[in-house]
Image (cartoon, helix red, strand yellow):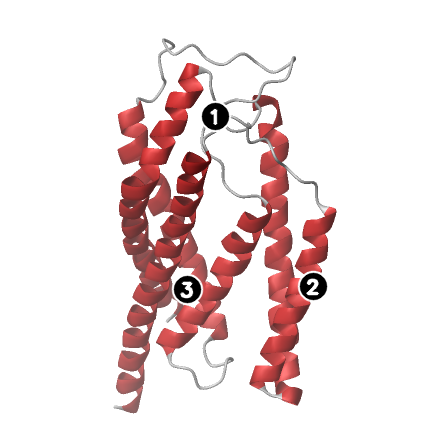
Amino acid sequence: MMKTLLVRGMLAGLIAGVLAFGFAYAFGEPSVNAAIGLEESGGGHTHSHDAAPASSPEEEELVPRDIQSTLGLLTGVVVYGVAIGGLLSLAFAFAQGRLGSLRPRLTALLLTAGAFTVVFLVPFLKYPANPPAVGQAGTIGSRTELYFGFVAVSLLVGIFATVFGRKLADRLGAWNGFLLAAAGYLVVIGVVAWLMPVVDEVPATFPASTLWSFRTASVGTQVTLWLGLGLAFGAFAEKALTRRTAVTAA
């Protein structure tokens, strides 16, 4: 059954990745193109005296922009979707039956909602995505480390909160256990977010509308990906488990 769930999870991730690509291409690429135009004109970056000079507009790109925005974007989003689909299937195999008498569809949706929150939404609120032309070249490494470090902390705190909430549910009931676990997660992650450095490298001259469009498209792409994954995998998993139950009963 584990192999069956894993294959279905990866297939659901593939479907979700294609859906997310469609959203990102339709709603995200216009703001990316606008930001790249600002970068090429020299109107977007904040530069310090020791920052590396911007690349010349005439400099040949290693990968053409039209390939980046189509095949490159599709490949990246689909690979990401397949990967998290496989991880979701493993989490589902562990959680199914341990969250009460929930149907597989609902279990899958709860897992994806929780993962979306701790892996993307909370880290995004601390370190939101920025389009090209925002940020200094010399701080890319440190900004990346801060973001993924915060993702790791959020994920670990989320796992501990889930385990803690499950134990509380046995004593106080499912709803009270959930509320206390969620409150504990918010308190801990709030303290961590307060302690971690603030990163704000958006130039004063950068158009607010472009920044807003890019960030809302980033959120929309992730919502499409995770929602599509939860719905597709929930349907696949429920069908597989129902078939297994029928075979066992026969």
Q: Quadrant of residue 138?
A: top right
Query: In this orientation, which residue lies closer to the viewer: 204 or 230?
Result: 204
- Under tag 3, what secondary structure? helix
Q: On the image, numbered disc 1 is attached to which residue?
A: 133
Counting residues from the N terminus, which is met first, the one under dot 2 or under dot 1?
Answer: 1
- Screen quadrant of the N terminus: bottom left
Above/below status of 48 relative to 95? above
CA gap between label 3 and label 1 equals: 38 Å
Q: Earlier in the sequence, mark 2 or mark 3?
A: 3
Whether residue 154 sits left or right of residue 234 in the image: it is right
Which percent across, then down, holds residue 79? 36, 45
Q: CA distance from mark 2 to mark 3?
A: 29 Å
Looking at the image, residue 85 lies above or below residue 78:
below
For badge 2, the amino acid type reads Val
Q: In terms of secondary structure, where does tag 1 sit? A: loop
Q: Nearer the viewer, residue 239 or 184?
A: 184
Residue underneath mark 2: 187
Which mark identifies residue 89?
3
